[in-house]
């Protein structure tokens, strides 16, 4: 236990559960070139890659090899790694993994507004294609930086990715509409589906997708659902987003599923896509064509 500046004891961030080693088999044909657009890696060596003290949780390792095994087990040919909040702006481990798999992987980084052009150029060469704003977990970069960072990355053709609660969007819309790059919203807006698709937050999310060319990650159903573990209440929510713009929807596992009290089955999460998008052509767009376009993967054969 550490101490606060006042000398009072500070609780250690809670430990996370480890992902399940087994997962359900696919219930639909997974196309060649399918991409899991949202996962994280966490090094086994906590000394070489220290976690930031302001983190909201402490995850177990989720190594490069375990991540690649998960992609293979879920039938994914490609992946997008997102810099995890527990590392703050220290992107080293993610970048090292990206550099070892230039054809298979892309990344989303987390940087301070003071990042240098040389650092951004090196990240681009490693496969980074966007920067993340995260206001839900400690260790992230907040809304104050989004305009500065968006202008810094515009010439790279990158995008801004947002981990937020979509109930915050109505107030943020005037700023977000002016950003010089597209946005990607994590976890279908990360707001409870009980709010409904007619809520102001969901309507604002649809507006950004429909009228401003934004994207949404069909991920993290367990973060917005009240029905563990089939998450059936997410079906109309996901379908409404897909109907809004099937060409700007992405799928992600959110592996290794950090900060949960009950661990989820990664294969079962993937299989939800068959319920959300029963049409095979739309699933192909979500899994293959859309990520190719956004992240710059080579066209699948």
Image (tube, rainbow, N blue to C red):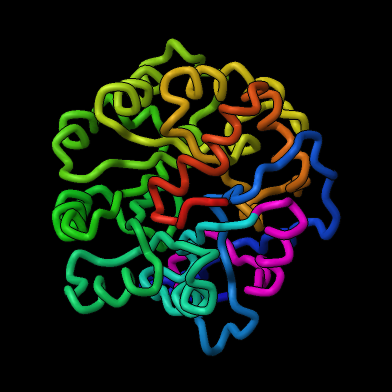
Q: Quadrant of residue 68?
A: bottom right
Which residues make up the magenta segment? 52-76
Q: Nearer the viewer, residue 175 or 3?
A: 175
> Along the horizontal axis of the image, is 270 left or right of 236?
right
Residue that sits furthest to the front in the current view: 301
- Look at 65% across and 37% down and name the residue there: 222
**73 sits left or right of 1 in the view:** right
Residue 168 shown in magenta: no
Q: Is residue 65 magenta?
A: yes
Q: Horizontal and vertical percent for residue 104?
A: 54, 64
- Residue 97 in percent (x, y) is at 53, 75
Percent position of residue 277, x then y: 62, 24
In the orientation shown, which residue stands out farthest toward the bottom? 48
Viewed as shown, does residue 106 lie left or right of 178?
Answer: right
Q: Is residue 26 above or below residue 16?
A: above
How far from the left and from the top, in percent, is residue 300?
A: 54, 51
Quick one: quadrant of the N terminus? bottom right
Q: Which residue is located at x 38 percent, y 27 percent?
A: 167
How many discs appear? 0
Q: Nearer the viewer, residue 3 or 112?
A: 112
Q: Is residue 122 above or below residue 242?
A: below
Image quadrant assignment for residue 282: top right
What's the residue at 42%, 14% (across, down)? 199
Q: Where 83 falls versus 101 (above or below)?
A: above
Q: Nearer the viewer, residue 222 or 156?
A: 156
Tell me the residue at 63%/66% (across/down). 59
């Amino acid at each position: 236990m550490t101490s606060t500046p006042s000398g009072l004891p500070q609780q250690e961030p809670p430990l996370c559960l480890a992902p399940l080693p087994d997962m359900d088999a696919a219930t639909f044909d997974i196309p060649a070139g399918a991409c899991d657009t949202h996962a994280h890696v966490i090094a086994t060596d906590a000394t070489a890659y220290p976690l930031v003290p302001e983190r909201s949780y402490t995850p177990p390792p989720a190594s490069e090899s375990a991540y690649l095994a998960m992609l293979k087990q879920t039938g994914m040919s490609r992946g997008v790694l997102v810099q995890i909040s527990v590392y703050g702006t220290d992107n080293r481990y993610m970048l090292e993994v990206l550099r070892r798999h230039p054809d298979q992987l892309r990344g989303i980084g987390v940087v301070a507004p003071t990042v240098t052009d040389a650092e951004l150029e090196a990240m681009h060469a490693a496969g980074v294609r966007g920067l993340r704003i995260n206001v839900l977990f400690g260790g992230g970069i907040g809304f104050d930086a989004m305009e500065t960072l968006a202008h810094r990355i515009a010439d790279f053709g990158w995008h801004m990715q947002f981990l937020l609660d979509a109930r915050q969007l109505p107030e943020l819309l005037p700023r977000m509409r002016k950003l010089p790059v597209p946005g990607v919203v994590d976890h279908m807006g990360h707001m409870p589906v009980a709010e409904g698709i007619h809520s102001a937050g969901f309507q604002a999310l649809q507006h950004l997708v429909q009228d401003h060319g934004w994207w949404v990650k069909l991920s993290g159903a367990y973060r917005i659902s009240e029905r563990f573990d089939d998450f059936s209440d997410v079906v109309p929510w996901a379908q409404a987003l897909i109907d809004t713009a099937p060409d700007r929807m992405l799928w992600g596992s959110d592996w290794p599923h950090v900060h949960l009290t009950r661990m989820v089955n990664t294969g079962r999460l993937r299989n939800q896509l068959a319920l959300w998008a029963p049409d095979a052509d739309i699933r192909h767009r979500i899994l293959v064509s859309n990520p190719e376009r956004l992240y710059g993967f080579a066209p699948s054969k």
